[in-house]
Image (cartoon, grey):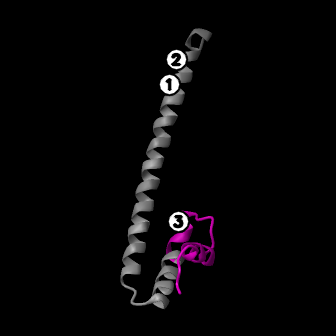
Amino acid sequence: MSEEHYDIVKEAVLNHLREVFEEIEVDIARTHEEKYAMLEDVLENAGDVDELKVAFTQWYNDQADDLELEYELEELWQNSLGDVDLS
């Protein structure tokens, strides 16, 4: 290809990859929404704090690999409760 097509080709490649990345982001967002809904469901079925922890642990164990979370189970649990006054 000649230099005169440089800008056209560059723009076409960039536009296409932008569309591909946007599709990926939509898919990721949908997956995260589904995982979050699953978490809401399992927590809703818990009757007390101990059952909440068990339900959260089970959800984490089932979903962590798919979500590629950068946090360990206990770290997420503790961070979730970090600003909560339980006294």
Which residue is denoted by mark 3 in the rendering? Answer: 66
Q: Which residues are magenta?
A: 62-87
Q: CA distance from mark 3 to mark 2?
A: 38 Å
Which residue is denoted by mark 2 in the rendering? Answer: 8
Q: Amino acid at mark 2?
A: Ile
Judged from the image, the secondary structure of the residue bearing numbered disc 1 is helix
| Residues tagged 1 and 2 counted as in contact (Cβ below 8 A) | yes
Which residue occupies 43% across, 52% down?
27
User: Residue 38 occupies which quadrant of the picture?
Assistant: bottom left
Q: Is residue 2 above or below residue 34?
A: above
| Residues tagged 1 and 3 counted as in contact (Cβ below 8 A) | no
Judged from the image, the secondary structure of the residue bearing numbered disc 3 is helix
Residue 54 location in percent, x, y? Answer: 50, 86
Name the N-terminal-most of marks 3 and 2: 2
Q: Amino acid at mark 3?
A: Asp
Which residue is denoted by mark 1 in the rendering? Answer: 12
Residue 18 location in percent, x, y? Answer: 50, 35
